[in-house]
Image: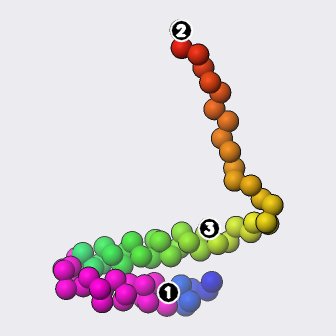
Amino acid sequence: MNDEATKREVEERFNTVKRLYGDRLDKKQLEGVRTGVEAIVRASQAVSAVRLENGDEPFSVFSPYREED
């Protein structure tokens, strides 16, 4: 996604939150919401950038069992 598309998505998502909850939030809180929305959009872009095939399995973490003394 290019920078313009990212800005547009952030604005659309922020405006949805503002429309639904803006009457309950002050200016400082709305700026916090905008910052959070931008972080979520960028994180979702990072996740979407990882290409997976149908057969790719989740990464599993090996943690051996250690018997207590």
Mark 3 or mark 1: name the one nearer the start of the chain: 1
Q: Secondary structure at mark 1?
A: helix
How many marks the image carries: the answer is 3
Q: Secondary structure at mark 3?
A: helix
Q: Position of residue 64 (x, y in %)?
A: 65, 27
Q: Residue at the spot x=61%, y=86% of the render?
A: 2
Q: How is the image coloured?
A: rainbow
| Circle 3: residue type | Val
Q: Secondary structure at mark 2?
A: loop
Looking at the image, do the residues carrying marks 3 and 2 touch, with CB atoms under 8 Å apart? Answer: no
Q: CA distance from mark 3 to mark 2?
A: 42 Å
Judged by its main secondary structure, the magenta piece is: helix
Mark 3 or mark 2: name the one nearer the start of the chain: 3
| Circle 1: residue type | Glu
Q: Quadrant of residue 55?
A: bottom right
| Circle 2: residue type | Asp
Instruction: Name the residue that disc number 2 marks.
Output: 69
Q: CA distance from mark 3 to mark 1?
A: 16 Å
Q: Position of residue 13 (x, y in %)?
A: 43, 84
**Which residues make up the magenta segment?**
8-28
Residue 19 shows which numbered tag? Answer: none
Q: CA distance from mark 2 to mark 1?
A: 55 Å
Compared across the picture, whether 8 is left or right of 16 comes to right
Label 1 Cα neighbours within 10 Å, binned few <14 / some 14-19 / many ≥20:
some
Instruction: Name the residue that disc number 1 marks.
Output: 9
Q: Position of residue 40 (x, y in %)?
A: 47, 71
Residue 24 in the magenta stretch? The answer is yes
Instruction: Name the residue that disc number 3 marks.
Output: 47
Q: Residue at the spot x=60%, y=20% of the render?
A: 66
